[in-house]
Image (cartoon, grey):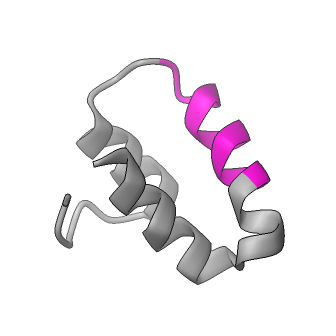
Amino acid sequence: MIRKLRADWTAIHGWRTGWRAFHDRFLSCGWPPVPLVREQMLGTAQGDLF
């Protein structure tokens, strides 16, 4: 699920800065379930998780 979220994030934000921004944003969410983090980061819970 995390790899899919990272792929979706970098598709929107670009690869060069996307990975660092993804890492910082993902870790800032703490440890809630990945679907909740996905919704917070992408603004939607829609889409495949894997």
Query: At x 37% / y 51%, what residue is drawn?
Result: 38
Q: Which residue appears at 75% of the width and 53% of the height?
A: 21
Against 4, residue 12 (above or below) is below
Quadrant containing the C terminus is: bottom left
Where residue 48 appears, as percent x and y from the top left, is: 17, 68
The residue that appears at 70% across and 57% down in the rendered structure is 19
User: Hey, which quadrant is residue 37 in on the image?
Assistant: top left
| Residue situated in front as seen by the camera: 45 or 48 | 48
Residue that appears at 58% across and 80% down? 12
Is 31 placed left or right of 41 in the picture?
left
Please provide the residue range marked out in magenta: 20-30
The image shows residue 20 at horizontal and vertical percentages of 78, 51
Main SS class of the magenta portion in the image: helix
Q: How many marks?
A: 0
Q: Nearer the viewer, residue 43 or 48?
A: 48
Q: Is residue 33 above or below residue 23?
A: above
Q: Is residue 36 magenta?
A: no
